[in-house]
Image: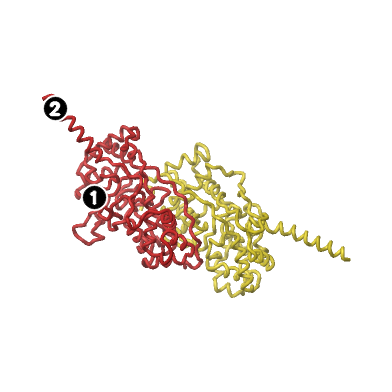
Chain colours: A red, B yellow
Amino acid sequence: MKLKAVLAAACFAAAIAVADEALWQALPEVAPEPADNPTTPAKVELGKMLYFDPRLSSTGTVSCFSCHNLAEGGDDHRPTSIGVHGQKGGRNAPTVFNAAFLSAQFWDGRAPTLEEQAKGPPANAIEMGMANLDAVVDRIERIPGYRPYFEAAFGKGDVITIDNIARAIAAYERTLITPDTPYDRYVKGEKSALTKQQVRGMNTFREVGCMTCHQGPMFAGPELPMGTGFFMKFPLQTESPYVEKYGLMEDKGRFEATGNPADAHMWRVPTLRNLVYTAPYMHNGSVKTLDEAVRVMASTQLDKTLTEKQVADIVAFLESLSGELPAQTLPKLPPTPGDLLDP
Amino acid sequence: MKLKAVLAAACFAAAIAVADEALWQALPEVAPEPADNPTTPAKVELGKMLYFDPRLSSTGTVSCFSCHNLAEGGDDHRPTSIGVHGQKGGRNAPTVFNAAFLSAQFWDGRAPTLEEQAKGPPANAIEMGMANLDAVVDRIERIPGYRPYFEAAFGKGDVITIDNIARAIAAYERTLITPDTPYDRYVKGEKSALTKQQVRGMNTFREVGCMTCHQGPMFAGPELPMGTGFFMKFPLQTESPYVEKYGLMEDKGRFEATGNPADAHMWRVPTLRNLVYTAPYMHNGSVKTLDEAVRVMASTQLDKTLTEKQVADIVAFLESLSGELPAQTLPKLPPTPGDLLDP
């Protein structure tokens, strides 16, 4: 009987160990790349130029960098972003860091890939305000200094196309990753990388049920092929007092993109990486602090009220998912013809 | 008689050589620094952070970098700039590159130093839109990660002040210089640095009278102590057809700042460096190309109509005043509390 108990305990421990290994995954050191857009240095260089170039917007004032600022958290630290003519968007800018690992892009997952995502903001009337994607191509065509960079990345000929613009930006974004967080080092075996409180928070995070949705190396759902996305209803507990307090049901999420009633209030599960840099939180940027975000999620998704100790521990754990942001050199952009941006 | 003629010719040549040396001056390799704000690495690092930080604006969307983009020409390639809430300013953004060498700042020279200039845009309602300079200090105070950088630059204590913010930004701007243009190399003796056409343009530039105003290493007037500024009436020839065509008298220049009738249509003489990167031209950004700018200035200031060859030669010379822009690494900004920028 005693032997049996010991064996059972050992098996249980082994099962836990296996489960743990599957459960806690480090971020890969390299982002996956699609077969039709391998990451090359020339493409990354061009993509960085385009990413930083405000001339991709109608007024010449808004670039990818404007709302996805690489000097801070890959976002814009506003509740919701501001595009051309001072117009306010409806959702909080998600960080660009590690977006390369997400299985779908945008809060509602409406773009299957980074390439598709990159084609969204330029022709969005509120964001970068170009009339359409042809106007974006025309704008770039009118900056003669860009051509050599397109040819280096894509070969000679008719290479200044919206698809190549998007490919280059996506290739650059695949370099914007933060794989070396304390959490990642811990998972890889460096047990001193996390504090005791962070380890406690890690366990609480699992025990209370956060990993129902926030799992995998991105804590954004299970690993899925690109274009799939992992969607979840939010808020689930519509009676939670936080729902009204933070206006969490005003935006119908994926429904706004698909028109399908089944998609009402469905959202792509957002990553939990780099939250230290990306306050305020939620799709509408209504929640100002990380501890409040933890309370809101526990209430609206798990119907739980956490103790303040549980909240503090989980916050400590979440902080371990923030990494050193990769250093960036500013690209040098080709000169602007004086008639490019008329008043 | 023959000897006399030879001697006279030699003296004349010597006089020309001396004059030439005084006439054509290279840009110094280091910008001058005021006694009360020596340039230190800690100050430059902090200044760069502040320069890139859009949180110095009311909406969190406009930084120094927004209108003085270091990825391109130190300006914003628009006729006139756009600040918070999509508001359009009245004048063309001057390049920040080499501003450290100017004896007065802004188109109308209303700020004697870079330090004073830096205090202008943040509390300008159209530009960065902060209520006042105290609000700027408060904004920075509320980003805790800034404090160590201020202490490294200015010592312990009450060091987060508007003066120190301005000092740091100015110190950084003193590193944004382009001393190594083809023109500068030519003046220092590298005679192959300019093409034949550029040398011809250099002589034409002098002969037709451009150097009445555009002289010194910055081509922005004679070298003057900081705070002095070199002002000139523009347009001088109010009958020039370009005056109406380009609306050159709509803005009264320095008069708008001083209210002194004697300052009507007086302007600080702008630098001619890096014009390759800073189209469109003039205080109102109305002139799209460099060749047209040369025609306009010859007509409005010198009452001359240049030949197309003269224009092309002068443009070629002016192009030699554009240098390699100094490479910049993006600063890393301290994280933003979620309630910093309320909607």
Upstream in sequence: badge 2 or badge 1: 2
Q: Position of residue A290 (x, y in %)?
A: 32, 43
Q: Does the rendering let one see residue A70?
A: yes
Q: Where is residue B303 in the image (x, y as percent from the top left)?
A: 65, 72
Q: Say which chain tag 2 marks.
A: A
Q: Are the residues at dot 2 and dot 1 in contact (C-beta closer than 8 Å)? A: no
Q: Which of B304 and A9 is in front in this view?
A: A9
Q: Distance between the residues labelled 2 and 1?
A: 48 Å
- The residue to which callout 2 is attached is A5
Q: Residues within 10 Å of mark 1 (few under 14, many from 20)?
A: some
Residue B181 as seen in the image, left or right of residue A120: right
Relative vertical location of residue B187 with respect to residue A181 in this rendering, above or below: below
> At 60% from the left edge and 56% from the top edge, which residue is drawn?
B181
Q: Where is residue B243 in the image (x, y as percent from the top left)?
A: 58, 72
Toward which corner of the image does residue B337 lie, by quadrant?
Answer: top left
> Hey, what amino acid is under mark 2?
Ala
Q: What element carries label 1?
A: helix
Residue A243 tag number: 1
